[in-house]
Amino acid sequence: MNTPSIRSTIDSIAAKFPGYGGYAAAEKRRDQDRELRSLLAQRLGECKADLLKRMKLLKDQNRFDILQIADRLNGELDLAQQKTLAAYEGYSGWFADRVVDEKKLGDIVDLDESLISVVDQIRQTLPQNLDDIFEINSVGELIELYIQRFEGRRQLLHLR
């Protein structure tokens, strides 16, 4: 049984009912928004895991001066990940007291997609050797950029 083709057939039949097409499009955007935020949080978690491996090496080498800086980065990554996981979803359900229109939801999806590139930059910039203070600072700046852009999501949703 080919489930995607059955789903496609059901969707094409249901789309003939008034109002269903808009509902289905909004649901698709909602799903995309949720999946993108999940991917962002997962990738931030991978960055944290990489950083923690390097921090363990610093601890083993008694490099507490650099370990303190790396710990700050770890906290910033954790904050970025938690903000991503706890973000208000860029949509509203049938009985919600406020509605997010489809265009705005599309803008949110575009913003989330741009955040993926920032997370990829964080991962690529994370230095193999944490002795490089310049690279550590570059990672910190990228994390700040991620958080600033993510705050743009709240502005799109008009949250305070």
Image (cartoon, rainbow, N blue to C red):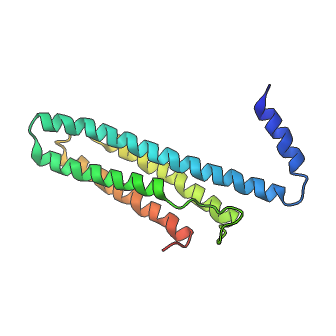
x, y percent for residue 84: 46, 55
Residue 29 visible at all: yes
Residue 138 visible at all: no
Residue 18 vertical placement versus 117 (above, below): below
Residue ID at (10%, 35%): 61
User: Quick one: 124 or 43, which is closer to the camera?
Assistant: 43
x, y percent for residue 101: 68, 66
x, y percent for residue 49: 33, 38
Exactly how many numbered labels are in the figure? 0
Residue 109 vertical placement versus 13 (above, below): below
Residue ID at (31%, 55%): 76
Residue 156 in the figure: left or right of residue 13: left
Residue 156 in the figure: left or right of residue 76: right
Which residue is outermost to the front? 95
Which residue is outermost to the left? 62
User: Quick one: 77 or 98, which is closer to the camera?
Assistant: 98
x, y percent for residue 54: 23, 37
Which residue is outermost to the top? 1
Residue 145 vertical placement versus 14 (above, below): below
* On-image quarter of the N terminus: top right
Residue ID at (62%, 49%): 32
Residue ID at (70%, 66%): 95
Q: Which of the 4 quarters of the picture holds residue 10? A: top right
Residue 99 vertical placement versus 69 (above, below): below
Q: Which of the 4 quarters of the picture holds residue 89? A: bottom right
